[in-house]
Amino acid sequence: MSKKKKWSSEAKFKIALEAIKSEITLNELCKKYEVAPSQVHAWKRQLLEQGSELFKKSEKASKIKASQEAEQKVLYEKIGVSFITLKGPPIIT
């Protein structure tokens, strides 16, 4: 009885990408990495179905960053106003 092999996400991606490229046959790919054809098909399908999510995350991250920068600007302005108020007007002697 053989143990199940734990595949890293990097290895799954590499194997799925090689399957998509079709530079070698599925049987050769399975033999090369000692993985079942059904597993390669599953990883390939997952990559094709969810690959666009990689780009959505970067768009979302850009929007979040812009929102955080705007909020930071408002907070810095509030801090500046508070500092001036606490310090009071300049004293002329």
Image (cartoon, grey):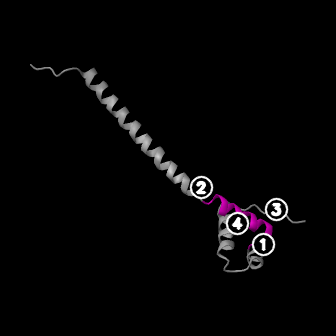
The magenta span reads 33-51
Q: Which residue is mark 1?
A: 34
Answer with mark 3 or mark 2, whichever residue precedes in sequence.
3
Answer with mark 1 or mark 3, whichever residue precedes in sequence.
3
User: Left or right of 24: which side holds 79?
Assistant: left
Q: Which SS type dominates the magenta stretch?
A: helix
Report how far apart the C-alphas of labels 2 and 4 lie in the structure.
15 Å
Crowd tier of the residue under label 1, counting other residues whose Cα lies within 10 Å: few below 14, some 14–19, many 20 or above: few
Residue positioned 70% across, 66% down in the render: 44
Q: Which residue is mark 3?
A: 4
Q: Which residue is mark 2?
A: 53
Q: Quadrant of residue 1?
A: bottom right
Answer with mark 2 or mark 4, whichever residue precedes in sequence.
4
Q: Using the image, tell me which numbered label, if any, was put on residue 44.
A: 4
Does residue 1 belong to the magenta stretch?
Answer: no
Q: Quadrant of the C terminus?
A: top left
Report how far apart the C-alphas of labels 3 and 2 lie in the structure.
28 Å
